[in-house]
Image (tube, rainbow, N blue to C red):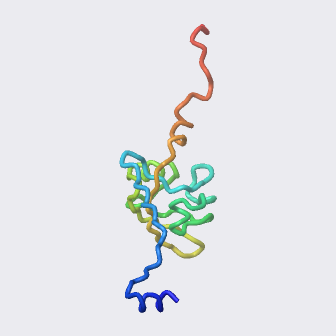
Amino acid sequence: MYALVALVLGVAVVPAKAPVPPEVRPDPMGKGYMGLWVSNNGLTIDRCEPNMPADKAGLRGGDTFVRVGSLHPSNFEQITAHVMSYRPGAIIEIEVQRGDQKKTFKVKLGTRPPDLDRRNSYPIELIDPLDP
């Protein structure tokens, strides 16, 4: 029908498309973040947060870290510090052991949530300044 009207009237009919929102730019002062959990400061992933960089890249629970960028880690604190040294939006190569295979993934880092840094910045036990 549109084609017939366009031919008769000599007018081009182009269906309207919904605008695509621009991609949110990462915080240039933020810290890199993958969005995954391990237990006991180990190297084996327990789970990846859904729709976070590690999950989007294809990492999954049970994968064991072999290499993160140029780092060959011995604990998860090293991985966290290394990833946080990158800015959000950086792409970092992750090598993991999955079963009997080594797999390499490219992870585009997200922004580390500020509340993760605040959790560990306060003392666990309140100190009374008047207590002798």
Residue at coordinates 62% horizontally, 52% vertically from top-left?
39
Residue 54, percent from left and from top: 52, 62
Residue situated in front as seen by the camera: 77 or 47:
47
Residue at left offset 54%, top offset 42%: 116
Residue sticking out furthest to the front = 9
At x 43% / y 80%, what residue is drawn? 14
Place of residue 114 in the rendered image (x, y in percent of width and height, measured from the top left): 50, 42
Residue 62 placement, left or right of 10: right
Q: Nearer the viewer, residue 31 or 10?
A: 10
Q: Relative to residue 3, is residue 26 depicted above or below?
A: above
Residue 108 position (above or below residue 111): below
Residue at image point 42% right, 91% down: 8
Q: Measured from the top left, where is residue 40 in percent x and y?
A: 62, 49
Q: Give 127 or 22, whichever is nearer the viewer.
A: 22
In percent of width and height, residue 129 lies at 57, 12
Q: Nearer the viewer, residue 55 or 10?
A: 10
